[in-house]
Image (cartoon, rainbow, N blue to C red):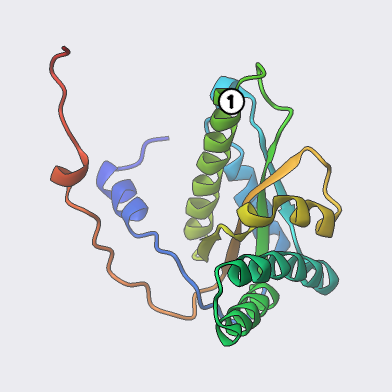
Amino acid sequence: MTIEPNVLTQFLRSRRSIRRFTGEPVPGEILRDILQTAVFAPSAHNLQPWRFAIVESGPARSALGQALTRRMTRDMQAENAPQTQIDNRVERSLRRIAEAPALILLCRATDAVRADQPEEDLMGIQSVAAAGLQLLLAAHAHNLGGNWICWPLYAQEETVWALGLPANWQPQGMVFLGYPAEQSNEKAPRPLEDVVVTVDGGR
């Protein structure tokens, strides 16, 4: 398959994080197609350590929300945050989890490693991140908006327990998906001069 480079680059540059969705549900066949595209991401040693949990039912979302916000509350209390701030953040988080048209939890299979080394764990995390980006781009191709949420990183064990996931599924993040109810903002990436160097020799 050949795609005009300018068409593909414009598509890639047009993806944005969307936080407000219409109430229209995302059809199951579209979710499956998105995930089928996500698993074509590259992975270290081709171990494909990504695992996905589609959190659909109200009870499952409630359990997830309670697990995440309990940990959130403890962490904010340890930082001496005002109770009103804690309550507002918990209420907002629970509402977002409940209202997201589709919620996909991104996990890493902790036993999908080639050797018992910290670098292998990091490579697995990087591989899951690559699949997560591929998932977001596939959703964008279906005219869906998405938002990557990192909350499960702060409550990995609680998330596994709340959803009854296999013990070797380590949560890395979750993605809210839905049809956008807001206009995406213009993105202003940092200039290439700030983030790129050309190395033409060593020491």
Q: Is residue 199 left or right of residue 179?
A: left
Q: Residue furthest top?
A: 203
Q: Nearer the viewer, residue 91 or 35?
A: 91
Tell me the quadrant of the picture where the N terminus can be found.
Answer: top left
* Residue under the point 64% across and 25% down: 47
Quarter residue 87 falls in: bottom right
Please tell me how many numbered marks the rendered image carries: 1
- Residue 87 against residue 155 in the figure, above or below: below
* Residue under the point 55% across and 82% down: 82
Q: Nearer the viewer, residue 47 or 201?
A: 201
Quarter residue 30 falls in: bottom right
- Residue 26 against residue 35 in the figure, above or below: below
- Residue 42 against residue 116 in the figure, above or below: below
List x then y, in percent, for residue 200. Answer: 13, 18
Tell me the quadrant of the picture where the C terminus can be found.
Answer: top left
List x then y, in percent, for residue 77. Answer: 62, 72
Q: Is residue 143 left or right of residue 109?
A: left
Quarter residue 124 falls in: top right
List x then y, in percent, for residue 61. Answer: 77, 69
